[in-house]
Amino acid sequence: MSISLVLAIVLYLYFGILFFAMNGVAFSGFFFVLGTICLVYHFTRDKIKKHRWLYMIVKICAAVAIIIFVTVEGMIIAFPKKSTENCDYIIVLGARVMGNEPGLTLKGRLDRALEYVKSNDDDCKIVVSGGKGDGENISEAEAMKRYLVERGIKPEMIIKEDKSVNTMQNFEFSRDKIENDSKKKVADVDVKVVTTDFHAFRSDKYAKMDGYKNISFYTERTKWYLIPVFYVREFFAIIKMMLVGIYTIFI
């Protein structure tokens, strides 16, 4: 059995787990598409090999794609993710809310924020950042605030930012909240970001674009069975961020 056929089967199985057993995790369709590409290659490989120029193009494209993917994933993995130094503000980045309750990813981030506050005896304020998305009864910020208050965080220590709809806006709108509360520029404030591990590298870039200087991360670890889908999705998000940045330079 060829590698391309085995890979296609594995990808189809993983897609099935994400789509059917886990209620359609975002970006799961990518694995179905990639599995189909592997399957098509398996059945057309001999025909492609007959045209040496076409086979060479396929090999070069595959090699370049793998090199880029491994490089970007290496940056994501190597980025520092667990700073325990004290800070002035924590920003908890939003994620999906199921009705009124934090979803799996968001709950993990909130638990990590609680772990940091309690283990470091830090009295920093917490900015919960996230607006209301499709299928959510309340904003992500409101769901986060309720979760933290129920677990002992004083309401006056929580600042709610409930307008953002993506990571870029998380930092932009949270910056305004922090500057209004501290009466300082965000560059002069120590900020710790709580998110999921795969998300830290890109979050750092967006934060730096918005003027954050003294920034560190304390992240939640991705569940092992979600590592492929979340890390692959993040790869494309980073490529998009880079392309938009290049486009902005030249317009």
Image (spheres, grey):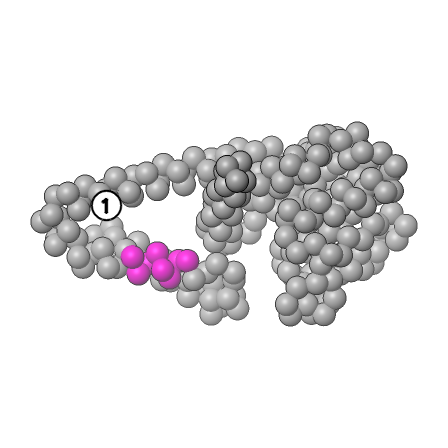
Q: Which residue is mark 1?
A: 58
Q: x, y percentage for residue 231?
A: 49, 47
Mainly helix, strand or loop, the magenta region?
A: helix
Residue 227 visible within the image:
no
Residue farthest to the front, as pictured: 251
> What residue is drawn where x is 15% and y is 51%?
48
| Residue 53 seen in the current view | yes
Q: Mark 1 Cα within 10 Å, few/some/many (few <14, many 20+)?
A: some
Q: Residue 223, percent across and down?
A: 55, 51
Going by the image, does 108 lie left or right of 68? right
Q: Is residue 93 above or below residue 17?
A: above
Q: Is residue 1 left or right of residue 92?
A: left
Please provide percent x and percent y for residue 176. Answer: 79, 44
Q: Which residues are magenta?
A: 30-37
Residue 204 appears in which quarter of the rendering? Answer: top right
Tag 1: amino acid:
Val
Mark 1: secondary structure: helix
User: For residue 98: magenta?
Assistant: no
Q: Residue at x 57, y 38 (%)?
A: 201
Is residue 210 rendered to the left or right of residue 155?
left
Quarter of image, res 34: bottom left
- Direction from residue 232 to residue 171 in the image, left or right: right
Q: Is residue 32 magenta?
A: yes
Report which quarter residue 200 is drawn in.
top right
Name the residue rendered at 52%, 62% in the picture: 25
Residue 248 drawn at (x, y percent) = 54, 40
In the foreground, 198 or 209: 209
Location of the N terminus by quadrant is: bottom left
> Residue at (70%, 63%) from the top-left corner?
132
In the rendered image, the vertical position of residue 21 relative to residue 168, given as above or below: below
Q: How many marks?
A: 1
